[in-house]
């Protein structure tokens, strides 16, 4: 039986996330991503200002994605914010040189340009971290996957995003998402 190339690509992306223990949306040095079950998704589409916005994608479907905007802070700003939020004490330091502030717990439905591309991190078995570029259709299929997949090498892959929700820097132009790049959060 011939396996479609898209299935192989999606399977490779899923195994990569499993193998990348260092890329996690929660962990020491970062604020936790907001819990998807705690909020509802806006039914109407929202817009964000043009530019780059960090946050988390939890779903992609029908030419839209569900996005939770957050702040990605580094250096002195990260340390000050983590202390102000009570994540660490007044004399403690962060394990990593970043802090994710995500106290709004929004779930915005954003329109995605059909030509948008998304760069996700991939770590093939016994290889260095690389990236793969996915189209909107491929990202939609990955988001909607509900069953595991077996790769050509026999590895098992979980369903859905490699990290859920997916930490990403989105590019916004003209009120639409025109692309994104996954952010690896150690």
Image (tube, rainbow, N blue to C red):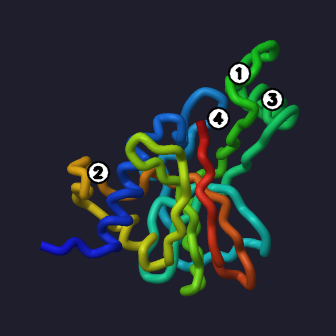
Asked if the residues shown at circle 1 and circle 3 are in contact, with their CB atoms under 8 angstroms apart, the answer is no
Dot 1: element: loop
Q: Earlier in the sequence, mark 3 or mark 2?
A: 3
Q: Which residue is mark 4?
A: 30
**4 lies above or below 128:** below
Quote the CA–CA distance across marks 1 and 3.
9 Å
Q: Which residue is mark 2?
A: 157
Relative to 66, is 62 on the left or the right?
Answer: left
Place of residue 52 in the rendered image (x, y in percent of width and height, measured from the top left): 75, 65
Q: Earlier in the sequence, mark 1 or mark 4?
A: 4
- x 46%, y 48%: residue: 123
For marks 3 and 2, give the one nearer the viewer.
2
Numbered tag placed on residue 79 in the rendering: 3
Quote the CA–CA distance across marks 3 and 2.
36 Å
Q: Give neighbour class at mark 3: few <14, some 14-19, many 20+ (Cα, 10 Å).
A: many
For marks 1 and 2, give the one nearer the viewer.
2
The quarter of the rendered structure image containing the N terminus is bottom left
Q: Earlier in the sequence, mark 4 or mark 2?
A: 4
The quarter of the rendered structure image containing the C terminus is top right
Q: Earlier in the sequence, mark 1 or mark 2?
A: 1
Q: Nearer the viewer, residue 181 or 44?
A: 181
Asked if the residues shown at circle 1 and circle 4 are in contact, with their CB atoms under 8 angstroms apart, the answer is no
Q: Earlier in the sequence, mark 3 or mark 4?
A: 4
Q: Which residue is mark 1?
A: 88
Q: Quadrant of residue 44?
A: bottom right
For marks 1 and 4, give the one nearer the viewer.
4
Q: Quadrant of residue 139?
A: bottom left
Q: Earlier in the sequence, mark 1 or mark 3?
A: 3
Dot 3: element: helix
Relative to 7, is 97 on the left or the right?
Answer: right
**49 lies above or below 157:** below
Quote the CA–CA distance across marks 4 and 2.
26 Å
């Amino acid at each position: 039986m011939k396996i479609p190339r898209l299935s192989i690509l999606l399977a490779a992306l899923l195994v990569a996330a499993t193998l990348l223990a260092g890329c996690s949306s929660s962990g020491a040095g970062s604020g936790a991503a907001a819990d998807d079950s705690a909020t509802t998704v806006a039914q109407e589409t929202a817009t964000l200002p043009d530019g780059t916005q960090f946050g988390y994608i939890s779903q992609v479907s029908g030419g839209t994605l569900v996005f939770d905007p957050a702040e990605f802070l580094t250096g002195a700003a990260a340390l000050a914010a983590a202390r102000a939020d009570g994540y660490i004490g007044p004399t403690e330091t962060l394990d990593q040189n970043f802090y994710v502030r995500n106290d709004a717990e929004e779930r915005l439905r954003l329109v995605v340009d059909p030509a948008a591309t998304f760069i996700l991190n991939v770590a093939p078995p016994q290889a260095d971290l690389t990236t793969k570029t996915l189209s909107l259709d491929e990202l939609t299929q990955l988001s909607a996957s509900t069953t595991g997949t077996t790769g050509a090498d026999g590895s098992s892959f979980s369903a859905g995003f490699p990290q859920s929700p997916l930490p990403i820097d989105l590019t916004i132009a003209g009120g639409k998402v025109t692309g994104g790049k996954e952010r690896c959060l150690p």
